[in-house]
Amino acid sequence: MTDQEYMRLALDLAKAAQGQTSPNPTVGAVVVKDGVIVGLGAHLKAGEGHAEVHALKMAGDKAEGATAYVTLEPCSHFGKTPPCSNLLIEKKVKRVVVASLDNNPLVSGKGVQRLKDAGIEVEVGVLEKEARELNTVFFHYMAEHKPYVTIKTAMSLDGKIATVTGESKWITGEQARLDVHRYRHEHDAILVGVNTVLADNPSLTTRLPNGGKHPIRIILDTNLRTPLDSLVVTDGMAPTWIIVGSHVPQEKWEQYTSDMVTVIRASKSRIEINEVLAILGEKGILSLFVEGGQQVNASFLEAKCFQQFIVYISPKLIGGQAAPTIFGGSGFSSLADAASLSIQSIETIGDDIKIVAIPK
Ligand code: NDP
Ligand code: ZN
C-alpha cells in the first residue's frame, strides 16, 4: 500500500469519530511496520487518549522502526494528556507522515520540529485537503476564536418557513428531519430567537434512533421573555443559555433557578450577533447550528456571520404574502450587496431537496 492509502485509512478512522471530539479536532493514526499494519487509532473524546496513543499502544514493541501516519500534526504541548510527539520519539518510530499541520498556535509546526530534532524522518501534506476538510470547524475556531456557524432552514417550494398563522410543524418529511438531528448531534450549540420558543416551545434536543448528543441551547431574548415553563427551561435535557440585553435586572433572571439554565447579559441593550459569537467562542463553543426564525436568520445574514447555509426544500406551496420567508429584516436593497454563495451539494432526501452552500 502507498502512503496515500495508509493515510486514507487514518482519515476514515478519524471520520468515524466526527462530532464527538469537540473541543478537540478529529484525528486518526495508523502504524505500519514492514508493510504490515500494526496499530490503528482515533481520538474519540476530549480528555481521552489522542489517536497516536491508541495506535502506538496497539503496535507495542513493533512501533520501533515503524512508520506512523497521522491526519493532524502530533501535539507538542502538555494539555490534558502528555505530548504525542514525545511518545513517537520514545517508541523509536522511524518515519512520521502527517496530512495537515495543526493551526493551534500552541502546536503549529512545533510538533513536526520536535520529531525532526529527534532524527525522525517527517513528511507533511499527504491528503492535506481531505484532512483540512475533516476539521473545518476546528480550523475556523482556531483562526477566529468564534464558532463555525451553520444556518439551517426548512422551507416550502415557494420559500415559506411557516404559514400566515405561524404553523411550521412540519414543512419537511421525516427523513429530512432525521438529517437535521444528525447535525444537532455534531454541533456544540443550537441557537434560536425567543419568538420560536414562544411559538413552538421546542426542546431543541437530538433525537436519533440510537440517541445522540444534545447541543447546548442558546436563546436570543432581549427582554427575558423565555417562559419559565418552556421545555428549554424545564426539561433538564441539556444546558440552556439565554442571552439578554444589558438592561435586564438581576431580580428577573434569578427566577430561572434551574442549574441547567444560565442567563448571560450582553454589553448593550440590543443583542449583536458579533458579540454573541465572541461570547460563545470564549466559552469554548466551536460549532453553532442556527435554527432561527426569520428575524434571527436576518441578523446573521446582515452581520455576514455564517460559514454554511443548509436549506431543506419541501414540495409544498404555502402562499400568503404575510407568511414568513427565510430571512426577515430589511434585506439588501441592491443586488450587488447580496450575499453570494457557492453550492456545495444538492441531494434528494425522501420527498425533499437539501442544498448546502457556503459564502464565496
Ligand atoms: P425568531 O425565532 O427569529 O425570534 C426573533 C426574536 O428574537 C426577536 O423578535 C427578538 O425578540 C429576539 N432577538 C434577540 N436578539 C436578536 C437579534 N440579534 N436578532 C434577531 N432576533 C433577536 O422569530 P420569528 O418571529 O422570526 O420566527 C418565529 C417563527 O418562525 C415561528 O412561527 C417558528 O415556527 C418559525 N420557524 C420556522 C423554522 C423553519 O425552518 N421552517 C425554523 C425556526 C422557526 P426580543 O426583542 O424580544 O428579544
Ligand atoms: Zn497528541
Image (tube, rainbow, N blue to C red):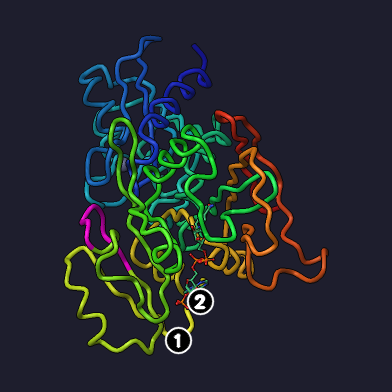
Q: Is residue 23 visible?
A: no
- Secondary element under disc 1, as helix, strand or loop, is loop
- Horizontal and vertical percent position of residue 44: 29, 36
Confirm whether the magenta stretch covers residue 174: no
What separation in Å lies between label 2 and label 1 (alpha carbons)? 8 Å
Residue appearing at x 44%, y 33% in the figure: 71
- Residue bearing the label numbered 1: 268
Q: Is residue 126 left or right of residue 60?
A: right
- Residue bearing the label numbered 2: 272
Secondary structure mainly formed by the magenta segment: loop
- Horizontal and vertical percent position of residue 252: 26, 84
Q: Nearer the viewer, residue 95 or 78?
A: 78
Contact between marks 2 and 1 (CB within 8 A): the answer is: yes
Q: Is mark 2 within 8 Å of ligand 1?
A: yes
Q: Is residue 130 left or right of residue 120?
A: right
Quarter of the rendering containing residue 111: top left
- Secondary element under disc 2, as helix, strand or loop, is loop
Residue appearing at x 39%, y 86% in the figure: 246
- Horizontal and vertical percent position of residue 93: 32, 26
